[in-house]
Image (cartoon, rainbow, N blue to C red):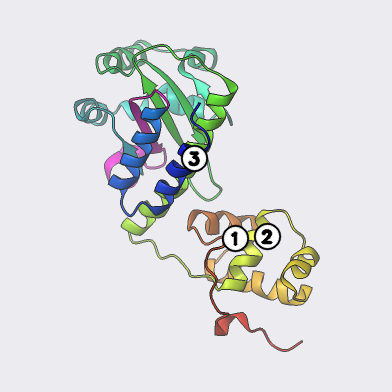
């Protein structure tokens, strides 16, 4: 199974990808080693203008992608419907349990088979404040679905989605606020479910100071809820991890004297 050093190497490659093409190659390489020659990471929002708006990272055959867009298959693709109903990976054989396929949907699957896109597993993806997305892994041969495979695909898809959003936002000129070190640390600890008191104990600062940094971080993003702050900071890769971003406190990290 695709675990251990190879998985860590793949995830590291996602995090260091400097372009959508580099992310595509890294994702395709990870999928190939798990037995899937085809992979498609697609953000569903804005699909009627797929090329212009949505994040699309795929190594599907170019002819199929062109036909998919020209025929507006993204409007009828049942994979998207099911991925918005489930919060777990699913094999394509399950689709008919959730959606009754029409003739034109059977035709879509028939065309996909011509390109070797026959059997697959899709991982639904969603981050608050972002539209739904999914990552599909496909191959011509049947798949032996195991809990280990599903868990690994979910990890790979989740990391690729985060990296893809970061690149997509940067490419489309989205203005990403820059949190100070303390603001990012407090936000990361909120994401771990810590209370203000616990955050203060961990960082060695008072609860009022914790609330100050969290308030400043929410102001930078223009959000009101902590859950929104956490979601945006994760998408923008602003959550500080151990061993990273060891920077000096900036002027913005010095609240008024208590």
Of marks 1 and 3, the one in the foreground: 3
Judge from the rendering whether residue 156 lies leftward or rightward of residue 185; answer left or right.
left
Say above or below: 123 vs 119.
Answer: below
Residue 101 makes an appearance in the image: yes
Cα separation between marks 1 and 3: 19 Å
Which badge, 2 or 1, is on the more N-terminal residue?
2
Return the residue at label 3. Answer: 5
Judge from the rendering whether residue 6 lies leftward or rightward of residue 252; answer left or right.
left
Label 2 crowd bin: few (<14), some (14–19), many (20+), radius 10 Å: some
Which badge, 2 or 3, is on the more N-terminal residue?
3
Judge from the rendering whether residue 71 lies leftward or rightward of residue 36; answer left or right.
left
Does the stretch in magenta take in 52?
yes
Return the residue at label 1. Answer: 242
Percent position of residue 239, x then y: 56, 60
Instruction: Give 116 or 213, whichever is nearer the viewer.
Output: 116
Percent position of residue 151, x then y: 57, 30
Residue 160 makes an appearance in the image: no
Label 3 crowd bin: few (<14), some (14–19), many (20+), radius 10 Å: few
Return the residue at label 2. Answer: 189
Instruction: Give 246 or 82, whichever is nearer the viewer.
Output: 246
Q: What stretch is highlighted in magenta?
A: 34-53
Dot 2: element: helix
């Amino acid at each position: 199974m695709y675990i251990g050093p190879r998985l860590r190497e793949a995830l590291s490659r996602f995090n260091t990808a400097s372009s959508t093409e580099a992310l595509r190659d890294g994702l395709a390489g990870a999928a190939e080693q798990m037995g899937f020659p085809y992979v498609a990471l697609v953000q569903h929002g804005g699909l009627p203008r797929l090329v212009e708006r949505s994040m699309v990272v795929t190594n599907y055959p170019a002819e199929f992608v062109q036909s998919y867009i020209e025929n507006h298959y993204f409007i009828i693709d049942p994979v998207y419907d099911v991925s918005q109903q489930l919060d777990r990976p699913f094999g394509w054989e399950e689709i008919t349990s959730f959606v009754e396929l029409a003739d034109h949907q059977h035709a879509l699957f028939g065309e996909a088979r011509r390109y070797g896109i026959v059997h697959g597993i899709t991982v639904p993806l969603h981050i608050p404040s972002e539209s739904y997305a999914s990552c599909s892994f496909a191959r011509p041969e049947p798949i032996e679905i195991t809990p280990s495979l599903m868990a690994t695909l979910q990890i790979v898809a989740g990391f690729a989605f985060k990296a893809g959003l970061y690149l997509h936002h940067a490419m489309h000129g989205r203005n990403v606020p820059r949190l100070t070190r303390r603001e990012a640390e407090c936000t990361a600890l909120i994401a771990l479910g810590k209370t203000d008191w616990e955050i203060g104990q961990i960082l060695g600062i008072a609860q009022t100071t914790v609330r100050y940094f969290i308030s400043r971080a929410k102001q930078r993003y223009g959000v009101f809820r902590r859950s929104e702050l956490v979601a945006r900071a994760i998408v923008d890769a602003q959550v500080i991890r151990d061993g990273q971003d060891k920077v000096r406190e900036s002027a913005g990290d010095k609240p008024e004297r208590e």
